[in-house]
Amino acid sequence: MNHADLLERTHYCTEITHLEPGTTIRVAGWVRKRRDLGNLVFIDLYDRSGILQVVFDPVRNPDLVVLAQEMKRESVLTVEGTISMRPDEAVNQSMKTGRIELIASRVKLHSTSRVPPFHLIGDQEVNEELRLKYRYLDLRRSEMFRILSVRHQTYQVVRKFYSDNGFIEVTTPHLIRSTPEGARDFLVPSRLYPGRCYALPQSPQILKQILMIGGVDRYFQIVKCFRDEDSRADRQPEFSQIDVEMSFVTRDTLFRIHEELMAVVYREVLGIEIQTPFPRMTYSDALVDYGSDKPDIRFDLKLRDATDVLAGSGYQLTEDAIRNGGGVRGVVYPGGAGLSRKQIGDLERIVRSRGPGGLITFKTGDGGELTGSPLGKHLEPERRLQLVQRFDARPGDLICLAAGGFEETAWALGDLRLEIARRGNMTGDSLKFLWVIDFPLFEYVPQESRYQAMHHPFTAPLAQDENLLDSNPALCRAQAYDLVLNGVELGGGSVRIFREDLQCRIFKALGLTKQEAENRFGFFLEALRYGTPPHCGIAFGMDRLIMMLAGTDNLRDVIAFPKTLQAACLLTNAPSPATSEQMKMLGLKSLIENSGKKETT
Ligand code: ASP
């Protein structure tokens, strides 16, 4: 039998349900499982589209049955055969191809497989390290291909959207000078300039602004960015952004365009219509009402201030907080009066981890009476009533209070609010987009007694706050914004500084001397002197957006070859030691004992 033509498929395994029984087709893929009934052998053959049952029948084709009987899992085949309807009792409704099967007439075995180290079928929990080490096997799982497809589709929709709106995609280099986004740089030592390094971009921030100075006017790019940060479940050291910059437009135009982008992405990728425009909330309101800079507004549960109700009660915890310039704030836990001591203890741990010394809880009884906290003894009936009213607490609710400084109680109660919603399944399945605006320009780093840019140092202050730059930087607000979806930050950006004098004042406020600013950003300051248009921009975390679209909560699942939490690639064993020759060539000496040896792997 001539097998030379048994390579190319005519169809994917599951894309055949429209064909007439009796049609001859060729499929190609991997053996998922084999069932040997003695007289008949069944093989589940799969490719990226799914599974098709292939039948080997000894009457029609005895040679093939012998081959099939020896077929190992994950062997690679091309099979030619005819489509046949399954007998009624063999119909499998849960499979796309559950009504049909392929009667094999010719088969080519291309390669065999060792026994895979984990099951590729079903959604059994598989150790993630194993999945990452054998990523090629993991990628064969249909769920992984589904996510990769969502990613692909999103890329196409995003590119088309920007292109249709007059943006052009410009590629920026990866070997550049440091661009500060608040993280550590990945450095690449230079061979031609020993002792010098390139930095991998934390983002193309400065370059995209320079594109505006270069007249590009509307830029976008789906781009890799690199940040050497400590491991966090929702971060990867190497990630993708949708990066955008526009000249001669207001912030509102940028918002409108990106509301439309989200609408188009959700429509095209998932067939879901979302409502635009998105609401806006200032950073300050977000913190006061939700204890978060990325509020999840799918549920209400707002934080409330109870300082005035409790002031002068004589209860030490709250009195101390108020005396030190802080206050008492809280959130109500609907139906939480029935929680056990242990459950309340868990809530308290959440609050304490953000700073406040404890959680004060009151159960609301049927008649509206409060029980629970020792603070209760210090409150006259009138104050208790006020407390119930302040929180709109109903019988059976739990009022949760935290005492301390504004920021620490806000963040603590914000976390608590999310936990209450999680436990009470309050989120539903709606999509709630939100612009958070007017972020502070700076944040204070107490360990280093200095300010750092909250967004990045190229962000413009609010015009009315510019005069605070020198006198009270902490109060100066920025023309910065984030787009939040269901409590997840999808992206952020800002209106930029386009005047050199203002840019220099910001560098000064950040503690850079004139000389330091010149050394680090001289090329950019120079560019600003040559006719800079007003411009603004934004960047979206592509990986996070895909997570939301694909409905997964594991960031690594949306990246074909991700790093572990310890920033290692288990597939290729990166990072690996540099050889002594490489070190020498780069003009580097290692302080680490066993590095610089010849690589053995
Ligand atoms: N470069 C910023 C970031 O990566 C986004 C922006 O301001 O456009 O977060």
Image: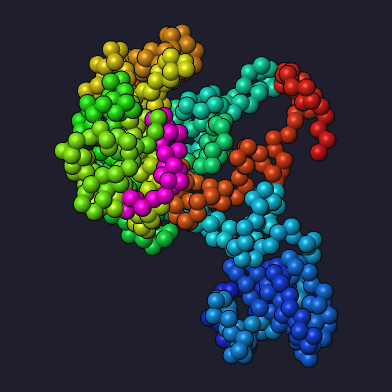
Q: In x, y percent, where is residue 594?
A: 79, 25
Residue nearer the viewer, 601 or 380: 380
Q: Inspect this view and state whether residue 340 appears.
A: yes
User: At 80% across and 82% down in the image, what residue appears?
Assistant: 65
Q: Is residue 596 left or right of residue 293?
A: right
User: At 36% across and 58% down in the image, what residue appears?
Assistant: 428
Residue farthest to the left?
A: 382
Indicate the quadrant containing the N terminus: top left, top right, bottom left or bottom right.
bottom right
Residue nearer the viewer, 552 or 311: 311
Q: Is residue 58 left or right of residue 192?
A: right
Q: Is residue 1 left or right of residue 479?
A: right
Q: Quadrant of residue 51 in the image?
A: bottom right
Q: Quadrant of residue 105 in the image?
A: bottom right
Q: Inspect this view and state whether residue 279 appears.
A: no
Magenta stretch, main secondary structure, is helix
Q: In x, y percent, where is residue 396?
A: 29, 53
Q: In x, y percent, where is residue 444?
A: 39, 20
User: At 30% across and 34% down in the image, what residue appears?
Assistant: 375
Residue farthest to the front?
A: 377
Q: Quadrant of residue 358 in the image?
A: top left
User: At 53% across and 50% down in the image, what residue appears?
Assistant: 554
As displayed, is residue 556 above or below residue 289? below
Magenta span includes 512: no
Residue range highlighted in magenta:
335-356
Residue nearer the viewer, 58 or 213: 58
Residue nearer the viewer, 367 or 156: 367
